[in-house]
Amino acid sequence: MARLTEHGLRRSVKVSGLFATAYGNVGSSIYYALGLVAAHALGLTPLVFLFAGGLFLLTAKTYAEGAAMFPEAGGSSSFARHAFNELVSFFAGWALSLDYILTIAISAFFVPHYLSAFPGLHGLDHNPGDIFGGLIVIATLAWLNIRGIGESANLNVVLAVLDLCTQLMLVGIGVVLVLHPSLLIGQVHIGVAPSWSEVIFALSLAMLAYTGIETVSNMAEESKDPGRDVPKAVNLVVIAVLGLYAGISIVALSALPVIHHGVGYNPELGKFYAHAGYATKLGEERNGYQNDPVLGIVSKLGLHGTVLHAGEYYVGLLAATILFVATNAGLIGISRLSWSLAEHRQLPGVFSRLHARYRTPWFTIVFFSGLAALLVLYGNTNVLGNLYSFGAMLSFTIAHISVIALRVKRPDQQRPYKLPGNVRIRGAEIPVSAVIGGLGTAAAWVAVVALHPEARVVGIPWMIVGVAGYLYYRRRQGLDPYSEHRIPRAARPADFEALGYRTALVPIFGTDVSASALSAAAKLVGADGALYAVFVLPVPSQLSLEAGLEEEEAAGRLVLESAREQARRAGIRIHTGLIRTRNPGAALVDEARRVGADVIYWSTLHAPAGERRLGPTAMYLLSKRPCRVIIETENRPDGQRSEVRPLIGARG
């Protein structure tokens, strides 16, 4: 007499959350990409960023269509799975895994460089201080992620807004204090400073600044409306990033212009040169600001005394925090990606193994953190940047090709967002932007391989070893390398007929059910009312919402069966559901609105320790109050006996 409903994912991320997370990953790149690009592009740095930004725009639009179609973890790997087969999907995923490893390594490596702005920490701006600092960042975040402490959506939004405002402020102050258009034009000597080979080299490196768009795909599975929210968030990220990168690079070259140096020691650049040429302190590794370019801008804005120190401390702390969060995002991203690959039998099952206590993918975190730590030990920012572009361009190219192939193979596939500017070829609508973007990212990848030896020495072997391992693993498992094979899941319970109209929502946490709460809620809605018992299953941020925690989910279904049995004995009409969510409070508010609940009745007697009395979920319910909220709490005034006190919050 009850209906057991699996509501599945609780999608609660809005456009602001998608934008904040994506901007935090893409926007953080300016703190290290600016100096690396300026070292080669010199006076053409703003134009190089704009050109690379054009490819980023095309790629972001492609990801918007793909992520809206398939809002699931995996990004380009997921697109390739639907467009081609498992081998191509793994190839894209393995290239993307290199990106995430390098995100962790390069973000962690630059954290100590920005902290060196503070007194007593100046030793962190060079080896071995920056290496030890980077290793500490990685080890700390790995430990926190194993314990299940992940991202905070609210913190991401605050940091993204703060970072955006800070960069806008730097551009504004720089335009007023140091901008000289004639100086910008005068420091460009096309074909000489920079040479054409240096321009191509810088273009391939500049894409480093725009990697991180894969985050949108990972977050799409948590979006309230992926078809609408993902494209909006992508557009906002593109506008913000393109505008700020152009503005900051212009201000940077006004504050730290390109100068001609002769043979010998140049006091202005603080370096000895064996050959005459052109250089800017923005791109100088020693006695320059290649490793902390934004701090270099602040130091050359003409500020003095307390104002200068305050500006350096503020930017140093903000940059270090943003990069720390970006490192954590890399760990979470590689956890979700590897889980997705393991779930599709593309990686061994050990990559989906959860910690016995914390229920987080501990092996994945330790394994990939170790690889990132090895790259930090090398301590060369140019090598890290070059390798980053290798994996990113490969993933981007596969994403473009996959979206084009899906237009041909699945013309009737529902596309909540569709790329504009299409040409009909043999009955299929081919997106011109994806074709141009794919050619551009493929050319950038070729340039990376041709011009950066690290790509040939590390990147290509990484891909060969990965594909060989995948083929060997599939063969050992007796699986076809081209076909999709997923880890088998427990069968879902049957559905039952639902009764009733007036509704009460009863949240259930843990493995025990309060029969008194069910009875009390049933009395509230009356004999003709409907009772919803909802088991809330929190999902760690390191895992995809759609994967893992099979044991916990099975236990939740048993709890719901117990609730049904207790309700049957008490003559209560009930229908039940299970919600997987990262935010229990928001999930319950959404569920109450979905079913039109008149009351939420929650007994905290059987809730987790952190939710007893008035925990975070209870406070969230009372603050939002989608309907009347009644919370039973346990109170022991004398330390021995218990009494239940209802706390009632009315709507509004």
Image: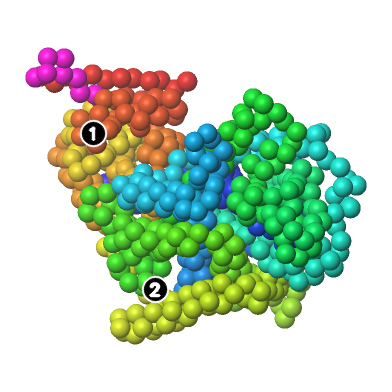
Query: What type of secondary structure mainly makes up the magenta span?
Result: loop
Residue at image point 71% right, 78% down: 427
Q: Do the residues labelled 2 and 1 touch (CB within 8 Å)?
A: no
Residue segment shown in magenta: 633-640
Residue annotated with mark 2: 346
Label 2 Cα crowd, 10 Å radius (few <14 / some 14-19 / many 20+) = many
Residue at image point 20% right, 34% down: 606
Q: Position of residue 296 (x, y in %)?
A: 67, 43
Say left or right for 441 vs 455.
right
Q: Position of residue 277 (x, y in %)?
A: 79, 62
Label 1 Cα crowd, 10 Å radius (few <14 / some 14-19 / many 20+) = few
* Distance (Cα) linking label 2 and label 1: 38 Å
Residue at image point 30% right, 19% down: 647
Q: Is residue 397 above or below residue 161?
A: below
Image quadrant assignment for residue 356 = bottom left
Name the N-terminal-most of marks 2 and 1.
2
Residue annotated with mark 1: 609
Image quadrant assignment for residue 500 = top left
Mark 2, secondary structure of its residue: loop
Q: Is residue 610 magenta?
A: no
Residue type for callout 2:
Gln
Q: Residue furthest left?
A: 640
Q: Where is residue 94 in the image (x, y as percent from the top left)?
A: 47, 71
Q: In this view, does 306 lie above or below 431?
A: above
Say left or right for 425 vs 147.
right
